[in-house]
Every structure is written in C-alpha cells, then in structure tokens.
Image (cartoon, helix red, strand yellow):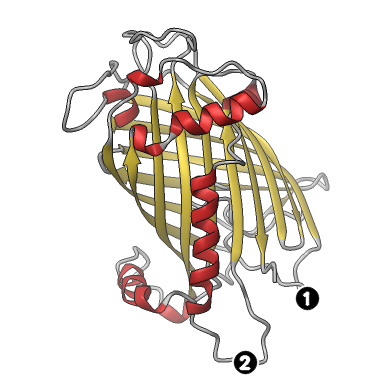
Amino acid sequence: MRILLLNCPIIAALCFFLNAGSPAIAQSDNSEKPLDAGTFSFQLENDLFSGTDRHYTNGIRLSWLSPNGQTFEPLALARDFLESVALDDDVPDSKKAVRLGFSLGQEMYTPKERHNTELILDDRPYGAWLYGAVSLHTISNPDASVKTLESIELALGVVGPAAMGEQAQDMVHEARLIETFEGWDNQIRNEPGIALHYERKWRLGDPRDLFGLGEFDAIPHAGLSLGNVSTHANLGGALRWGWNLPHNFGPPTLIQGGAPFLSWNRDTDKAYSVFLFTTAQAKYVARNIFLDGNTFRDSHSVSRRPWVADFSAGASILAGSVNISYTTALRTREFDGQDNNSRFGSLSISMQNPF
C-alpha cells in the first residue's frame, strides 16, 4: 500500500521548516494571549482505500496554516499585495481574515498493469510530482453569515525520477509485502514544475434546520490552475448535513490542506460537530503533464480528454480543535482508452493550536 507515512524527504523537510521557521512569526500585540501556533494538517489520498491500484495512485501533503493576520516578515509584502488584489476589494481590511500557508507534498501516477517492464502505449504514463507550496487565504466578513474564501497558491517542484515516486512506492510496498510496479523506467522525464492555483468558495448563509433532523448547507466553489504541471478551470460545490455544522467552508480540498480556516473558540463554539457531505465538480483540462507528457522534450503521452468530472462523498468529525475527514472519490475517464473511472479515498486530519 502506497501510504507514504515513511516518505523521508517530505517529513525531513517539514521538520526543518517547523523548527527553523516558526520563531520568525510576527507576534500579536496582545502579549497576554497564549501563543497561537496555527493549524497543522495531514492529507493522504490513495486508490487502495477504494480497492483499486492504478492511475492517480497516491497523494500526500503536510501543511501549516498561520494564525489570522500573522505571517513571516519577509513575506508580508507578498501577503499585502495578494490581499489588495482579492476580488472583494469593496470589503475593508478590518473585515478580512488573512492566513498564510506552507505545504510539502508528493503525487504519484501509474498505469493499470504493474508487471510490464515495456512502455505501455495505451495506458497513462508513470509519473511523480514532488513540490513545496506557499499559499494565501483571505476570508471576507469572517464574522458574518455570508462570507467568501479566496485562496491562491504557488507550488514549485520537480516532475520525473527526481520526484522519487519509484523509491517511495517501492519502500512501502516492500515493507508491506505488496508486489511492486516494474515499469518506472518508462516514467515521464525530469522537468521543473510550477503550478499556480486559485480557488474561491462562497458561504451563502447559516446552516438551515432540516425539520429537527440536523442541519443542512451548500457551499459552491470555482477554481483555476495555470502551469506546466496542470492548466484547468473547475466549477462545483458541496452539500453538508449533520449536527452543529461549523460555519466554515466545507470539506477540505488539496489547496486548503485539510484546514478548517476559521479559528475554533473554546469559549463560544460547539464542542463537537458531526456531518456527512457530498461534492461534485466539472473540470476543463487544457494541460496535464501526467497525460500529455513532458513540456520541452519527447516522452510517453496519451490522448487527454478535456472534460473531467469529480464526485465524492464522506464524513467529518470536528472535536474541539481537531478535525478528521474521510472521503471516497470518483473521477471520470481522463484519457481515450481508459477502461474505467478512477476511484480513490482521502483521509484528512488537522489540529489547531497544538501548543
């Protein structure tokens, strides 16, 4: 099973970041308040959660989200600029909550047949993507029932053998006595990767009571991605039903790194929240390096389908400052000749103010 808890490059880099970077956070003016260490989150996506072993086969991401209004001093200029160009320019800064995020992640893609050492022309290429990302998240009118979340993220990394997909996968497969994939020599070649992501979510109001059977709400979203790794646009939304629905922005997405985005207040917020959710989105894909192959050199590629749909369903538990969500997802065929839709599961865990 390709669950990359033992992915040494990501774990080591995150530890260095947390130990070396955290003291540089700007402190609040109120010295009587305890240190707000932000939100730490872990997100794992794996197809074996859904009983398959192919296509988008594993994604892992470790993230840290700053407390509201705090950031690293060298990045304050970038934060202020991104906040100034947010779409809600009619909302004064005093009515915005701004958070900065850092993430480290890895994604892996494989064909269906694991034992074939030759190039499989009619199936997707082997590929991996290792990256670090910085993101900015702006919530307009955070104390109101109607509010928006804008997220922008810049991810930089490497695609190809340098992303260490084969080594990470083999290490975990061998430890768990699972057969390894033998065609990694045919993976897409080394290439620097860049991806600029933008996402906007809308909260349309407070959750509605559902005839005494819990609460219900809807959270639409739209997004755009540019870069040689992926260029696409998407539109969709989430529906939630449960008890004590948090007034946040719904199920975690990859750009959010599993963080709930609105601070939990021990004195005023509910002690727990339990809910089910379902999401759907349509995506127009103009480029996907894991289907189109390398940008600047020849490599294996397949005929990409421009329109893709994602559907998911899951459950989430929010207990104080800890949020755990599990999602099962289905993605429609991404290339001509793909015999089945892709299915995978996602586990997300976040903890706010752990110290």
- Check the picture and name the quadrant holding the C terminus: bottom right
Is the residue marked by circle 1 packed among few (<14), some (14-19), or many (20+) residues within 10 Å? Answer: few
Q: Amino acid at mark 1?
A: Asp
Residue 175: name its quadrant.
top right
**Label 2: how many residues lie within 10 Å, few (<14), some (14-19) or many (20+)?**
few
Label 1 near label 2: C-beta < 8 Å? no
Can residue 251 be seen at all in this image of the molecule?
no
The numbered mark, 2 or 1, whose residue comes first in the sequence reads 2
**Is 347 positioned to the left or the right of 192 in the image?**
right
Specify the quadrant of the image occupied by residue 134: bottom left
Kind of element beneath mark 2: loop
Q: Which residue is mark 1?
A: 267
Q: Is residue 316 above or below residue 334?
A: below
Q: Give percent across and percent down for residue 75.
A: 36, 73
| Residue at x-position 59% and y-position 15% | 179
Disc 2 to disc 1, C-alpha distance: 19 Å
Image quadrant holding the N terminus, namely top right
Question: In the rendered view, would you say 163 is above or below 13?
Answer: above
Name which residue lies at 60% across and 41% down: 6
Q: Is residue 22 visible?
A: yes
Q: Residue at x 32, y 37 (%)?
A: 232
* Residue where numbered disc 2 is placed: 31
* Type of amino acid under label 2: Ser
The spot of residue 354 in percent (x, y) is 69, 67
For this rendering, which residue is in front, 277 or 64? 64
